């Protein structure tokens, strides 16, 4: 397996390899050849060489976004504001933090801090959200079947065999007692 394939896709180029790339480029070697010697792709080699020519350095760039600007005290204040007023939005909290501390914090940062504190902006779904039409149809269906329990008490369940109905006042002699009979074929 080649050296290039062994490297991770996100493996950083060491300072030593950056220096090698610049020296090879100063010697007039092509970017493709430099990439094969150092074990990097041509785009990486070209990016490092361009940075060397434009800025005179091969150091890696710092992060493009500023460091985290919310302190632990502000974090507690965010949680307190949210707990005391559940209807407050993350954008409102961000504006309040900016007015108090004079540095900006995005609404997304506020939501992330609230989530890390165990708070979330969404309620758990207790049931399916129904439209007005769904609710109307559901209530109509329930109203139509409201009396079913009473109606089903009057139904006699059978397995479709012939049944003789017992009289309301039973007679206690064995010969006169009406009993349901099934045909012998079943």
Image (tube, rainbow, N blue to C red):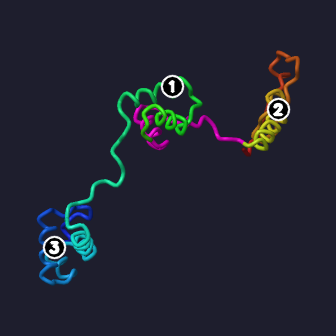
Where disc 2 sits, the SS reads loop
Q: Disc 1 or 2, which lies upstream in sequence?
A: 1
Label 1 to label 2: alpha-carbon separation: 56 Å
Secondary element at image label 1: helix
Labels 3 and 1: the sequence-earlier one: 3
The picture quadrant where one finds residue 163 is top right
Give the answer, above or below, for where 53 lies relative to 90: below
For discs 3 and 1, the disc positioned in front in the rendered view: 3
Outermost residue, top side: 172
Question: Dot 1, crowdedness within 10 Å: few (<14), some or many (≥20)?
Answer: few
Residue 172 coordinates in the image, percent (x, y): 82, 15
**Residue corresponding to mark 2:** 155
Which image quarter: residue 149? top right
Residue depicted at 83% across the width and 33% down the height: 143
Q: Nearer the viewer, mark 3 or mark 2?
A: 3
The reply to whether dot 1 and dot 2 touch (C-beta < 8 Å) is no
Left or right: where 54 falls relative to 139: left
Q: Secondary structure at mark 3?
A: helix
| Discs 1/2, front | 1
Residue name at image x 28 percent, y 55 percent: 62
Magenta stretch: give its range: 105-130
Magenta-drawn stretch contains 117: yes
Residue position marked by numbered label 1 in the rendering: 83
Magenta region, mostly helix, strand or loop?
A: loop
Q: Position of residue 135 (x, y in %)?
A: 76, 39
């Amino acid at each position: 397996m080649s050296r290039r394939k062994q490297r991770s896709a996100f493996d950083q180029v060491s300072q030593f390899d950056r220096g090698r790339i610049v020296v090879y480029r100063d010697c007039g070697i092509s970017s493709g050849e430099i990439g094969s010697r150092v074990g990097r792709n041509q785009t990486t080699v070209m990016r490092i060489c361009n940075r060397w020519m434009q800025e005179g350095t091969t150091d890696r760039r710092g992060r493009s976004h500023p460091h985290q600007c919310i302190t632990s005290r502000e974090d507690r204040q965010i949680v307190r504001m949210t707990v005391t007023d559940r209807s407050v939005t993350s954008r409102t909290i961000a504006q309040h933090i900016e007015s108090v501390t004079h540095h900006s914090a995005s609404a997304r940062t506020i939501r992330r801090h609230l989530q890390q504190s165990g708070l979330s902006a969404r309620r758990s779904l207790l049931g399916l959200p129904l439209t007005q039409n769904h609710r109307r149809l559901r209530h109509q269906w329930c109203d139509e079947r409201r009396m079913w329990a009473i109606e089903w008490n009057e139904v006699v369940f059978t397995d479709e065999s012939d049944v003789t109905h017992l009289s309301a006042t039973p007679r206690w002699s064995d010969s006169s007692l009406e009993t349901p009979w099934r045909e012998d074929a079943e």
